[in-house]
């Protein structure tokens, strides 16, 4: 006997099926938590009632400006309230949100505006000159530009474009949101870093984003009314979806335009921040903050860290300050973090390096993901022995729809039935993933594979080292040798010979750096060290 809808009458209808979308969280929050604070930014306090009304005005104003469902609205802003409002207001008019990295060069911004076909660009006043230079280089039609001044941080408007508040004033606070008819509709468009050519446009669905907002609170052990400090840039994987998630829990999002140790400690002490995400560089910043930038707090702060595996030394030091750190892993192509180093009860007695080594693993899939795998060159899972390396493959509801206008790259990324991450890793017997290195970061020295992550982890234990990155340096004899780039702590001293000797005591000879370069390391807007820049230096050294 069949169970098809036409045979049983068990079909979808308005009563039992609504397309999944994170927009529904704010609709509900405005009803359930109308007077609770939704957004905080300095002296600015926005309730859920006001938040919903402002988002509705934005959606309505965009429609009045000629934006139709499926068209792209771009933003060029740091983590300010207008950027959070755009995360709801742009899709609430049926459009696709394209948040652009504020640290990109003019040519790349122009390419993104052209490739995405932005109809409107909402830009913070600080980045308006960048926006206008990029528009001047566009090949296609220029978007309507809306300027967002930031008086809270002393960023005045330039007065050259339509003012954001004036634009909102043209909208209707009771605008009827244009919600998706199909949860597979596109919600946002995020461009990869483009370090190996033109950036690729990663497309998220309403369904994928909704399910990540449901999975994150389970993994982060969240209850009602969290206070979330928005450190991950909202132009990076849409800020790990924390802004979309917060209304579901009646949470308060504390916007952070400039990420400094003082800003983070102040937010924890003054606003009662309970959760935030950030790259390992943020943890190092907090660990090494001078005393006059620190603030006392008496509650546990839960932290998600992602990016390069945090060294054991970093994890040990940050936990002593009152932070509980969970290492998560993901990519732009997976809506952000999709695996977590879930802490097991049997590990509770581990201390020091043994504890930190467990926490540095990439872990197990989030609830909305399917089992992940480490794949060999034929696309088959390698043994779960913690030793056999392969490429990490991810599968589940938070994997992107694909690359916008790039079917070839999409097909290649999904070839084995998993999303191919480009990260080399191992699968432990307990099911936990661990990154060995980016595929392009493995150093092959005399036929031996050297993990840059392993060498970096050793150097980070040196008391003078603040940050380090290890890349391949061409070598006539060995083909490649490890070259370390080191940023020292303020006031600390160390020389090349000292660090090489330090590493040699802890590593096999072929893994020991053969050169050390000192100086500030180049970083992306999310705090990741730009190894491609260091490779250029190493190649010419």
Image (cartoon, rainbow, N blue to C red):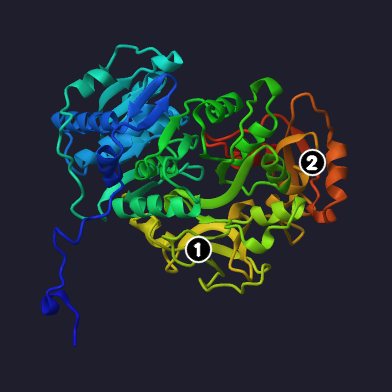
- The residue tagged 2 is 515
529 sits to left or right of 412: right
Expressed as whole percent of the image width and height from the top left, the position of residue 244 reads 36, 42
Q: Residue at point 61% right, 31% down?
A: 297
Identify the mark nearer the N-term, 2 or 1.
1
> Relative to the observer, which residue lies in front, 81 or 194?
81
Residue 323 horizontal side relative to residue 366, left or right: right
Callout 2 secondary element: strand
Quadrant the C terminus occupies: top right
In this picture, is 190 found above or below 142?
below
Residue 101 in sight here: no
Residue located beneath label 1 in the image: 393
- Front residue of 131 and 13: 13
Judge by depth and name the residue closer to the eye, 81 or 219: 219
Helix or strand or loop: what does disc 1 sit on? Answer: strand
Image height check: is 521 above or below 188?
Answer: above
């Amino acid at each position: 006997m069949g169970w098809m809808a036409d045979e049983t009458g068990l079909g979808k209808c308005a009563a039992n099926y609504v397309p999944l979308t994170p927009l529904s969280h704010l609709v509900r929050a405005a009803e359930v938590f109308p007077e609770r604070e939704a957004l905080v930014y300095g002296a600015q306090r926005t309730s859920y009632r006001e938040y919903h009304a402002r988002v509705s005005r934005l959606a309505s104003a965009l429609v009045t400006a000629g934006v139709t469902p499926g068209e792209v609205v771009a933003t060029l802003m740091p983590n300010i309230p207008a950027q959070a409002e755009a995360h709801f207001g742009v899709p609430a008019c049926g459009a696709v949100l394209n948040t652009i990295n504020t640290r990109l060069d003019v040519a790349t911004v122009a390419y993104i505006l052209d490739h995405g076909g932005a109809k409107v660009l909402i830009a913070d006043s600080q980045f308006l000159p960048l926006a206008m230079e990029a528009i001047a280089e566009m090949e296609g039609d220029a978007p309507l530009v809306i300027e967002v001044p930031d008086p809270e941080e002393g960023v005045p408007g330039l007065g050259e474009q339509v003012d954001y508040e004036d634009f909102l004033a043209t909208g209707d606070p009771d605008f009827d949101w244009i919600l998706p008819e199909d949860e597979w509709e596109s919600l946002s468009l995020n461009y990869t870093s483009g370090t190996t050519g033109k950036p690729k446009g990663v497309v998220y669905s309403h369904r994928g984003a909704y399910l990540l907002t449901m999975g994150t609170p389970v993994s982060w052990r969240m209850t009602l009314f969290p206070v979330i400090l928005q450190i991950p840039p909202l132009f990076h994987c849409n800020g790990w979806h924390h802004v979309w998630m917060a209304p579901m829990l009646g949470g308060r999002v504390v916007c952070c335009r400039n990420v400094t140790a003082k800003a983070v400690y102040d937010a924890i002490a003054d606003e009662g921040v309970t959760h935030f995400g950030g790259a390992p560089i943020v943890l190092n910043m907090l660990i090494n903050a001078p005393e006059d930038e620190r603030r006392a707090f008496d509650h546990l702060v839960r932290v998600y860290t992602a990016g390069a595996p945090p060294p054991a030394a970093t994890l040990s030091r940050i936990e002593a300050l009152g932070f509980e750190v969970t290492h998560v892993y993901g990519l732009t192509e997976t809506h952000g973090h999709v695996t977590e180093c879930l802490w097991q009860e049997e590990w509770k007695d581990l201390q020091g390096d043994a504890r930190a080594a467990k926490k540095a693993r990439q872990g197990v899939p989030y609830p909305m993901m399917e089992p992940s795998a480490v794949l060999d060159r034929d696309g088959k899972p390698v043994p779960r022995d913690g030793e056999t390396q392969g490429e990490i493959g991810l599968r589940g509801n938070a994997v992107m729809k694909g690359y916008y206008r790039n079917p070839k790259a999409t097909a290649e990324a999904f070839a084995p039935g998993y999303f191919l991450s480009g990260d080399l890793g191992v699968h432990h017997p307990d099911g936990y993933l661990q990154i060995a290195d980016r595929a392009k970061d493995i150093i092959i020295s005399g036929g031996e594979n050297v993990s840059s992550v392993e060498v970096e982890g050793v150097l980070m234990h040196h008391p003078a080292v603040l940050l380090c990155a290890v890349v391949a340096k061409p070598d006539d004899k060995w083909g490649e040798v490890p070259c370390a780039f080191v940023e020292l702590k303020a006031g600390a001293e160390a020389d090349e010979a000292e660090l090489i000797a330090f590493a040699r005591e802890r590593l096999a000879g072929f893994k020991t750096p053969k050169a050390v370069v000192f100086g500030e390391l180049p970083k992306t807007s999310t705090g990741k060290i730009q190894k491609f820049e260091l490779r250029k230096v190493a190649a010419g050294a």
